[in-house]
Image (tube, rainbow, N blue to C red):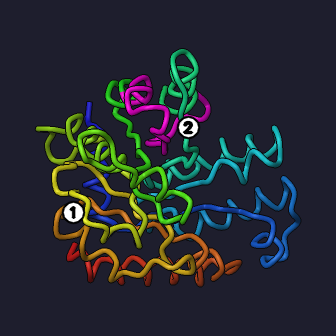
Amino acid sequence: MEGFGARLRHAIDTRGPLCVGLDPHAELLRSWELGDDVDGLRRFCGTVVEAIGDVAAVVKPQSAFFERHGSGGVEVLESTIRQLRDTGALVLLDVKRGDIGSTAVAYAQAYLDPASSLAVDAITASPFLGFGSLFPMIDMALSTGSGVFVLALTSNPEGAAVQRARSHDGRTVAQTILDEVSQVNAGVQPLGSIGVVIGPEAAGTGHETGRINGPVLVPGMGEQGGRPEHLHVLAHANAGAVLPSYSRQVLRAGPGGPALRDATQRARDACATVLKV
């Protein structure tokens, strides 16, 4: 069975280094002249899938923007996941789950078990209950050919107090997470399936990222402050594994499908120039 890391490497090689975040918040729906309701959500997602599903390597729905509409929103999420996968795009569900024991197992079953109606190619996860708490998700991912992206160095100002705190061995919490991911991915070719999340402004904080041997998701590109030039530091140590993620800059180009597609291609090409892929 081909692992997520190998499938992601192939997607980047064939479609380019781009993840598009699917964040249908109320203001965006209104700007598209859609209702902030289940019908507006469904129409929004249908337009995005049709416009960019065969262009972006990865599409990243943010689960919260679907969940806020209740069961109808979750139904749209399930449908959107199926439609995206039919286009050949990899689906990364941004859920940032993190818990222990049987609850962590249940999260793994919800998103990484192929039998689930919410099954995706990869999810985001929070390690701040201890990296070991994620192993039910990691083990499920490795057994099903899916992936997990672990939060490590985020760009929000509140994150630094926890992520850059130092433990008794002198490493920051973030470095400990990076090292743990490196161990899981050690020796996997062409790329490990357990990734990390590193914000664009956090990339230059002096952390060692060269041993990850897995994908590096860089969210917050475009209107949220990230620029292609922020990718230089990560690109040097993680050739072919950096996945920049744009959301608002691409989605605000809608509701026209051609404009969405053009915005996606321009973001992809700008990142590809820096990453040299």
Residue most toward the top?
A: 102
As drawn, 116 above or below 37: above
The residue depicted at 55 percent of the width and 49 percent of the height is 94
The residue depicted at 86 percent of the width and 62 percent of the height is 36
Residue most toward the left?
A: 187
Mark 1: few, some, or many residues within 10 Å (few <14, many ≥20)? many
Residue most toward the front?
A: 168
Q: Secondary structure at mark 2?
A: strand
Q: Quadrant of the N terminus?
A: top left
- The span from disc 2 to disc 1 (Cα, nearest Å) is 26 Å
Is 236 in front, or is 164?
164
As drawn, 193 above or below 238: above
- Residue kind at label 1, given as amino acid type: Gly
Residue contact at pointers 2 and 1, CB within 8 angstroms = no
Q: In the image, residue 269 lies at what x, y percent?
A: 35, 81
The span picked out in magenta is 115-138
Is 31 in front, or is 2?
31
The reply, left or right, for residue 211 in relation to residue 110 is left
Is 236 in front, or is 206?
206
The residue depicted at 68 percent of the width and 60 percent of the height is 45
Residue indicated by mark 2? 97
Q: How many marks?
A: 2
Residue indicated by mark 1? 240
Mark 2: few, some, or many residues within 10 Å (few <14, many ≥20)? some
Q: In the image, residue 6 lies at what x, y percent?
A: 24, 46
- Residue kind at label 2, given as amino acid type: Arg
Q: Within the image, what quadrant is residue 133 found in?
A: top left
Q: Secondary structure at mark 1?
A: loop
The residue depicted at 43 percent of the width and 32 percent of the height is 130
- Is residue 117 rendered magenta in the image? yes
Q: In the image, residue 3 lies at what x, y percent?
A: 28, 37
Q: Within the image, what quadrant is residue 72 found in?
A: top right
